[in-house]
Image: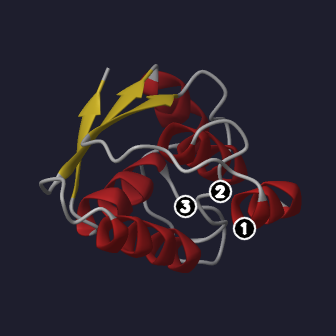
Amino acid sequence: MAVAREYARQLAPVRAPTTTYHLDGRHITDEPAFYCALGEAVHGPGGYAGRSPDTLRDMLTDCLRHTTATPSPRTLIWHTAHTARTCLGVTPRTDDRARTFEELLTLLRQTNIEVVLA
């Protein structure tokens, strides 16, 4: 995560604004993998999307603020979503453990992202 964060800060190329992003879900087996895959979907290889709900909200808010020419909401097509659903589970937890698949979906939707499960 630290390498992706530093890359995003200094070296990542600026991608043209878009309204549709494709999330490769084949390797999303835990919460850190979700943030890594989402960063690459939004910002390209090595892209950073945070490492917690708070940093993800900040990144998405910043991304939306800098691309006001494109209409909202953005669309995220989550390919192979069944992998994350199976590995992360769907029942919300009450402790500080990793978020479930449904909690991550809710988080994305709360930031004005339309999620299409594929």
Q: Residue 48, which numbered label?
A: 2
Crowding around mark 1 (Cα neighbors within 10 Å: few <14, some 14 to 19, many 20+) is few
Q: Residue 44, which numbered label?
A: none
Q: What amino acid type is highlighted by mark number 1?
A: Arg
Crowding around mark 2 (Cα neighbors within 10 Å: few <14, some 14 to 19, many 20+) is many
User: Looking at the figure, which quarter contains the C terminus?
Assistant: top left
Relative horizontal placement of residue 49, taking residue 81 as reference (left or right): right
Relative horizontal placement of residue 108, taking residue 84 as reference (left or right): left
Q: Secondary structure at mark 1?
A: helix
Q: CA distance from mark 2 to mark 3?
A: 18 Å
Give the residue pinned by disc 3.
99
Q: CA distance from mark 1 to mark 2?
A: 9 Å
Viewer-side label of 1, 3: 1
Q: Earlier in the sequence, mark 2 or mark 3?
A: 2
Residue at 58% over, 59% down: 49
Residue 6 position in % (x across, y down): 82, 64
Protein image colouring: secondary structure
Crowding around mark 3 (Cα neighbors within 10 Å: few <14, some 14 to 19, many 20+) is many
Q: How many marks?
A: 3
Mark 1 touches mark 2? (CB < 8 Å): yes
Q: CA distance from mark 1 to mark 3?
A: 26 Å
Give the residue pinned by disc 1.
9
Give the quarter of the image for residue 116: top left
